[in-house]
Image: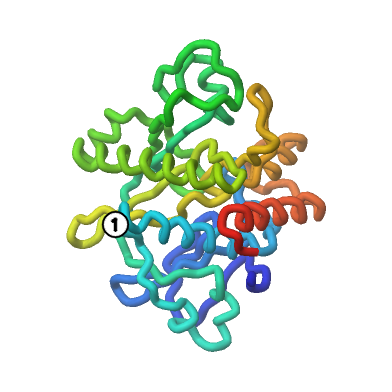
Amino acid sequence: MPSPTLYQSSLSSLSLLGCGKVRDNYALGRDQLLIITTDRISAFDVVLNEPIPGKGYVLNQMSNFWFARFAHHVPNHLTGIAPESVVASDEVVQVKGRAVVAKRLTPILIEAVVRGYLAGSGWKDYQATGAVCGVALPVGLKNAQQLPQPIFTPAAKANLGEHDENISFAAVEALIGTTLASQIRDLSLLLYREAAEYAATRGIIIADTKFEFGLDENGVLHLMDEVLTADSSRFWPADQYQVGENPPSFDKQFVRDWLETQSWSKTPPAPKLPAAVIEKTAAKYHEALERLTGEI
């Protein structure tokens, strides 16, 4: 079950390496990390001031589910070491259910984005150009429509608080080399297709997602960070899906939609989330986990 709400971790037994939008990273020697997934939530690249209770637990359990499911395709950053065993006894409450001990990898600074449906910025791009991130698509497609086949639309990772930049596959090849670029593209498409097929049996459409990869000391490609969570993916309930309309979702789109109703410049500080928005968002995250994994 989820641990108590955690907006910011505060371990004294380990050295803090840094904090991302959602995750806090601590050093474990020179070759491992303790990664704590907090209940922070971000929207439009701004971290909001209110936590979503249980969100970190949900994201951590989702990622672990997919890491295990994809283990036959690609190694991942998990070590199998219990997070509770590497912190002080009075700090266990901060890591239980929401943390992992991971290998320290060299990250590849590419967001491996796969889109199976027209949605969000992809739909806006298509309306303006007839393509998504430079990938030409057939004319006449509608909002939320499934694409003829999933497409790989990579982005260059930005610094915290900045927007990732969509780039061409040729740009990825120039950055990391043709062989590695092709490996990441092909693997990302494979994982998306396999995940989408499984999720469909659980009543969920995975419209799009992003993967992150890293290399170990031997140059072996690993899946890392988070995988197919409600933060890194767009999940839609299949029974409420209709082409031409924005489906309800199991991710933070509900928070984004509420923020769009506010007079806000999309720069810090963000508007204060109402209790009702927090409660409904938490419920959506938990429902996604239950639907996908059967875990509450």
Q: Residue furthest bottom?
A: 89
> Would you place residue 149 above or below residue 269 in this image?
above
Give the vertical position of 104 relative to 220 (above or below): below
The residue at the far front in this view is: 201
Q: Specify the quadrant of the image occupied by residue 90.
A: bottom right
Give neighbour class at mark 1: few <14, some 14-19, many 20+ (Cα, 10 Å): some
Image coloring type:
rainbow
How far across and down, in percent of the image, does residue 7 sit?
63, 65
**What is the x, y in percent for residue 112?**
39, 41
From what the image shows, is residue 246 above or below residue 103?
Answer: above
| 207 relative to 159 in the view: left or right | right
Q: Is residue 256 above or below residue 80?
A: above
Give the residue displayed 63% in from the left and 58% down from the top.
290
Residue 158 visible in the shown view: no
Residue 17 percent coordinates (x, y): 42, 67
Which kind of residue does numbered mark 1 sit on?
A: Thr
Q: Across the whole image, how many numbered discs are drawn on residues?
A: 1
The quarter holding residue 14 reads bottom left
Q: State the residue position of label 1.
A: 106
What residue lies at 38% left-to-right and 33% top-to-bottom? 152
Q: Quadrant of the C terminus?
A: bottom right
Residue 209 pos. (x, y %): 48, 41
Q: Residue 33, can we see it?
A: yes
Q: Which is more toward the observer, 47 or 65?
A: 65
The structure residue drawn at horizontal position 44% and vertical position 47%, both measured from the top left corner, is 159
Instruction: Quadrant for the N terminus, please.
Output: bottom right
Q: What kind of element bears circle 1?
A: strand
Say which quarter of the image contains residue 171.
top left
